[in-house]
Image: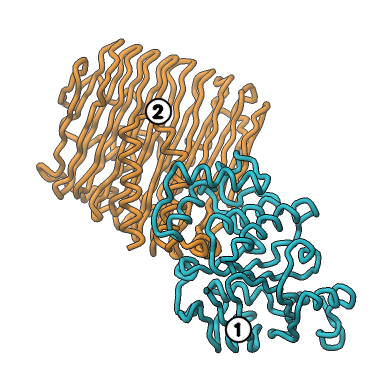
Amino acid sequence: MAEAQNSPTSSNAPGQGGPPPAGSTTAGAIAVAAEASSTVATRMSAPPSYDVADFPVPHGREEEWRFTPLERLRGLHDGTAVASGEAVKIAVEAPEGVTVETVGRDDARLGRTGAPVDRVAAQAYSAFTEAGVITVAKEAVLTEPIRIAVHGEGGVAYGHQVVELGAFAEAVVVIDHTGDAVLAANVEFVLGDGAKLTVVSVQDWDERAVHVGQHNTLVGRDASFKSVVVTFGGDVVRLHPRVAYAGPGGEAELFGLYFTDAGQHQEHRLLVDHNVPHCKSNVVYKGALQGDDAHAVWIGDVLIEAKAEGTDTYEMNRNLVLSDGARVDSVPNLEIETGEIVGAGHASATGRFDDEQLFYLMARGIPEKDARRLVVRGFFAELVQQIGVPDIEERLIAKIEEELEAAVA
Amino acid sequence: MATLEIRDLHVTVEADNATKEILKGVDLTVKQGETHAIMGPNGSGKSTLAYALAGHPKYTVSGGTVTLDGEDVLEMSVDERARAGLFLAMQYPVEVPGVSVSNFLRTSATAIRGEAPKLRHWVKEVKETMERLHMDPAFAERNVNEGFSGGEKKRHEILQLELLKPKIAVLDETDSGLDVDALRVVSEGVNRVRESGEVGTLLITHYTRILRYIKPDHVHVFADGRIAESGGPELADTLENEGYEAYTKGGVSA
């Protein structure tokens, strides 16, 4: 159980409670840095770079790799995973007002949201042969989502995707990952001034898949970014959603939902870099775990730079452990270089659905399976309701039901 | 007529790496329409009887039988017992985060009744029952027992009793921790269910206070894991005046 809140001004963040389950660790930290060098940045074993050669091969004890089972990355981290043709099929469906292109490595629109921060992201950047670029014209307001279907056909793939919204454009992007693949791919979201983008990334992989990626977002002046990361499948999924701002008035809401089953490793490492004044961020990730060696990792880094006055940020991670043998590592970090902010806080709580709760529900006639379903649905419902895209909400609820059916069977 | 029969019931718990026998041969028959008060000092095994009947996994039945209308209760899982008509109002109701009272009640009623109650009737039924228990309608949107006061938890238990209409209701120290007003409201709820004549009630209590509101037909004194004495309502008066000392060896009472 870790709880930490920080209110340099007048933030009033709710605390979370509950007993920690056996085998879970959570730790939180708030650093108020006096110097310009960020510990969030320096905790990494190498500075960000587009070139994989700038990163040593990780051995597993580095801060950014210590929770990840390297031996299950199938060579993505040490250069031995060689891309095979047609390993992944990508299909894009886009309504009018959207330009869909495939471009070469030298396209100037690639890599504008920041460099890879770890070796696998750099490997992906160094190894992809062509990239996808999706552009929504300025002031275009899409009524239908852009759908990107990524289907693994088995084999190794490296990819790169850019989604750019012109000024005041509005769009919903749904990225679906299915099938089996060993995939390292980075995605960039660039929001023009006043643009509104909702991205739903669903990791619904087959059970052997490995997926590692960095998702960089650059939020324009007065722009709104909403990200919903949903991870159900795969053997190892390790995603790195990162947000920075290109101008004041930007807002980022980062929602995440994961259901970690026996043997799965699902890791979400977030960074919100408040690098300009008067921006907001709100991070809520919730996960349920069930089964032996189910392992969820959540790292929530928020950096408020010295110049980012007027920042308002809150981040929360909640985990619900449904059975013995599962493990959660939840580490919120908040680093504050200015006190002139609206609010900053974080909370992490890991609770378990315990035998007493089960007994109480069953003593009211509710069968065990239904009791678990009731609790898990309740746990996720509040988060799902915040997505704001009705057909996605319905699909997620159905998917959660499906996961539960499989988990309790 | 529904009948709960408890014969020579022995129950053990594991504590400090040792098996401890808590119930040492309980015999009791509760029929539909009857109210039995079980009274006794702390540690006499009253609550163990309640939890063992409901099937709590912490308690192991080491001997004896429990039947409901001839059906073997001990063979049933916890939820099967509830669906067979056994209800336990708990002394310490459990918080269930993320599950609203309204969702919980409807799920439970659906399980017990075997079909989802018709929505319009159900909403009315819940609303009226809550009103009678002096419960704020906003209560239905709160999470089950989360942040409830002691009185709210007990009202919520009785709300379930009224809605689920069991054949046999076991009320485990429902009166503990209640002020006089709350005790009266809760007792009225229990009495409404009793007046239907369709429930057999096993009222477990440490104090005689609740018996001013809920009149038992039979009173049993529980001591050292078994029923030490049985009688009519007048036995409660004797206990009121003399306490449990006659039933605790050497006068030791917690």
- The numbered mark 2 sits on a residue in which chain? A
Q: Can residue B21 be seen here?
A: no
Disc 2 secondary structure class = strand
Residue B170 vs A211, above or below: the answer is below
Q: Residue at x 32, y 42 (%)?
A: A119
Where is residue A78? Give x, y as percent: 27, 50
Which numbered marker is on residue B12? Answer: 1
Question: What coloring was used for the rendering?
Answer: by chain
- Crowding at mark 2 (Cα within 10 Å: few <14, some 14-19, many 20+): many
The numbered mark 1 sits on a residue in which chain? Answer: B
Residue position for label 2: A226
- Image x and y of residue B8, in percent: 60, 89
Q: Nearer the viewer, residue A239 or B222?
A: B222
Which amino acid does the dot numbered 1 rest on? Thr
Q: Chain B's colour?
A: cyan
> Dot 1: within a 10 Å radius of its alpha carbon, few (fewer than 14), some, or many (20 or more) residues?
many
Q: Percent position (x, y) of residue A208?
A: 24, 55
The C terminus of chain B, quarter of image: bottom right
**Element type where label 1 sits in the image:** strand
Residue A349 vertical placement versus A382 (above, below): below
Which residue type does callout 2 highlight? Lys
Please tell me which residue lies in front, A205 or A341: A205
Mark in front: 2 vs 1: 1
Judge by depth and name the residue closer to the eye, A291 or A27: A291
Question: Could you tell me how far apart the alpha carbons at marks 2 and 1 are, in whole angstroms?
Answer: 55 Å
Figure chain in orange: A
B242 lies left or right of B96 = right
Q: Position of residue B33 (x, y in %)?
A: 61, 70
The answer to the question of whether label 2 and label 1 lie on touching residues, with beta carbons closer than 8 A, is no
Residue A297 seen in render:
yes
